[in-house]
Image (spheres, rainbow, N blue to C red):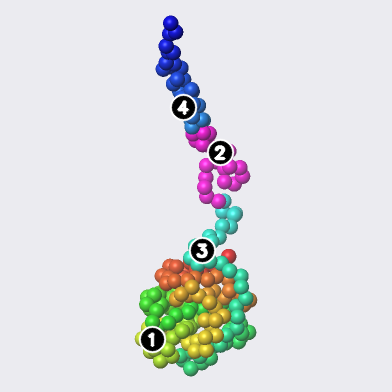
Amino acid sequence: MMEPKREPDLRRRLLPWAIGFAVVVMSITILAILAAEPGPEPEGPLAAGTTDPPSSVAVRPVPTIGFATDDPAPDFDVDAFDGSVFRLSDHQADDGRPILLNLWASWCFPCREEMPALDVVAANHPEVLFIGVAVEDDPAEAEKFAAEIGVSYLLAIDESGEVSGKYPALGLPATFLISPEGRVIAKLFGGASEASFEEFLGFLDT
């Protein structure tokens, strides 16, 4: 009479699982030890645990407000609300200062919020020409808005659509920084504070 087959021993059945689990645990432990090991000590002027660069090394912070570009600045002319006509090429030939071009509209609430801050920054930076141009706006409403907001920098209107066509924006307000050489070196889309505009002007130094 044949004896019935015996069930495999429980320990023999669990042995492969135990080995696999141990291998996984060991792998994780080794990886954790390697990740925790400190890297090589820095050499040169930043050695000895310091994070400050030596005084002989010039470090210029890169602005985080807006983004850098290197596009040609298309020429344009607009009628200012003070009765003058502003033409970019004439300014570059006669004045030569960099330009902060701010696009706004009377119906744009963020424009109304940021323009007083921009006015303060303009007063602090006479080495830069600030000009605000109303785009996609009704001339009468834009002029009324300009009188109401009362900023000291030059305000004008783009009745022909020339500026908005040559300086496309991802909504309003939009700000473009133009170098004396006639390059758009930085762009900023959306409302900004006084501190943000100050940082944005840092693109002139990069």
Q: Can residue 41 be seen in this view?
A: yes
- The spot of residue 203 in percent (x, y) is 55, 68
| Precedes in sequence: disc 2 or disc 3 | 2
Q: What whole-number distance in Å separates the C-alpha atoms at marks 2 and 4?
A: 30 Å
| Precedes in sequence: disc 1 or disc 4 | 4
The residue labelled by disc 1 is 145
Which quadrant of the structure image shows residue 148? bottom left
- The spot of residue 88 in percent (x, y) is 58, 84
Q: Which mark is residue 63?
A: 3
Secondary structure under tag 2 reads: loop
Q: Residue 21 carries which label?
A: 4
Q: What whole-number distance in Å separates the C-alpha atoms at marks 2 and 3?
A: 30 Å
Q: Which three-letter amino acid code belongs to the residue tagged 3?
A: Pro
* Residue at the bottom extreme, as displayed: 83
| Precedes in sequence: disc 2 or disc 1 | 2
Task: Report the front residue among 133 and 55.
Answer: 133
Q: Is residue 18 left or right of residue 43?
A: left
User: Which-is-in-front pick, marks 4 and 3?
Assistant: 4
Secondary structure under tag 4 reads: helix
The residue labelled by disc 2 is 39
